[in-house]
Image (tube, rainbow, N blue to C red):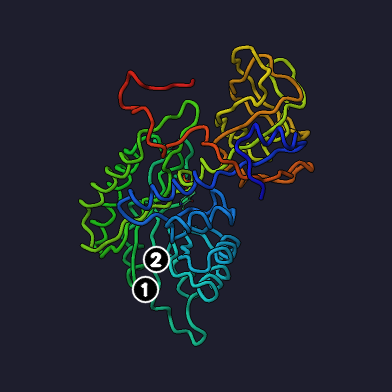
Amino acid sequence: MHHYPDAAAVVRALAPDEPVILNRPLAAARAARFFVEKFPGKSLYAVKANPSPDLLQILWDNGITHYDVASIGEVRMARAALPGATLCFMHPVKTARAISEAYHEHGVRTFSLDTIEELEKIVSATASENGEPAADLRLCVRLRVSSEYAELSLASKFGVDLVDAAPLLQATRQVADWLGLCFHVGSQAMTPFAYVQALERVRAAIADSSVVIDMIDVGGGFPSIYPGMEPPPLEDYFHIIHRHFEALPIAYNAELWCEPGRALCAEYSSLIVRVEKRRGDELYINDGAYGALFDAAHVAWRFPVSALEDDLIEGLDEFSFYGPTCDDADFMKGPFMLPADIQAGDFIEIGMLGAYGAAMKTGFNGFGAAEVVIVQDEPMASLYRGDRIDPRESDNVVSLR
Ligand SMILES: *Cc1c(COP(=O)(O)O)cnc(C)c1O
């Protein structure tokens, strides 16, 4: 893979006709080391945020040993990329064949569930050929929690309701060698209080069921930085989670896990796009809703942008983007702040696309291609550089909105 100092150097060298994904291995390595050193437990990487084998290798090399996979495709891919990794199959609705292949062929022992039916499926799919039940299952019951403090909800889809949790925990304890409780507060949780509320529900579930709990998994949801979304320091999340974990009625040697996706890889990638046409304050660019800008289109996520031309002299103005396909829905409202004199032929770098960005690209309408290169500069924003203004000091709040 080619290396360049930064996006401007890529444009000078390639004048690329198609979008270019810029990867920053050092940013992903730094994020991994941050979680490994500072989270008071084990950090699993949620592979769906960005399944690139290069990224998996970087995370592995920097101490991430456990990976949260959600489909048999992710199990196979992660196992091929990282033969020594511990894979945890954390989707609560799996097929029997997927469970069986994961257990018997890929060494997966940890599975999540949120119903008795899924528990029975796991038990039968992992039994030996003569019907002997597996004695080494590590099972996590997923509890339904509120998403009210997250930008993207994962609350309504999965998780057993608190009122139904006790019988499921008791039944799971009967067959599990090791029993965990997990939840997901939603993605981009903007306050640590999201986890406090969820851990209170965990406490109630444990009290109702009176089972021995070996592990608490607080899931993903750890934020990154985007325009208008400046979260508190991650250390605040870690301290608050640790304090509430320590106060739970669980085994003295119980483990604490988390499953960050976004926070480990958002800073890993940015994207170079070209303006193909301008119509007023709308820029027609060559990536969009069916490409790496899925969230910009579907949930009006605002990503940081920077014009890559040095002959633009006017001040910043608000722009929206159209993507390249023939579909009106290929529209990103923004606003994206760019020099007022930007025009067709100019290149733009769009930052913070390492999570749920590069991973979302499709080939719809023939527009999926993108070259991938490595750059050496800093990401447009970072939670890990140690030079952030403390957002708790109100005078210092940086609001880009
Ligand atoms: C998506 C997902 C994650 C990662 O979420 P982020 O918000 O990216 O941190 C973790 N665990 C599960 C079960 C998920 O579905």
x 65%, y 31%: residue: 8
Badge 1, how many Cα within 10 Å: few under 14, some, many 20+? some
Name the spot of residue 286 as percent of width and height, x first: 73, 33
For the point 56% across and 49% down, the residue is: 50
Disc 2 crowd, CA 10 A, few/some/many (<14, 14-19, 20+) = many
Give the residue displayed 49% in from the left and 43% down from the top.
Answer: 27
Residue linked to disc 1 = 175
Label 2 close to label 1 by CB (< 8 Å)? yes
Q: Is residue 103 left or right of residue 273?
A: left
Front residue of 115/305: it is 305
Figure quadrant of residue 137 = bottom left
To which residue does mark 2 refer? 139
Q: Amino acid at mark 2?
A: Leu
Q: Earlier in the sequence, mark 2 or mark 1?
A: 2
Viewer can see residue 148: no
**Amino acid type, callout 1:** Val
Q: Residue at x 76, y 25 (%)?
A: 345
Position of 66 with respect to 298 (left or right) is left
Q: Taking 401 as reference, is 304 above or below it?
A: below
Estimate the x, y position of residue 148 in percent, counting from the top left.
Answer: 40, 36
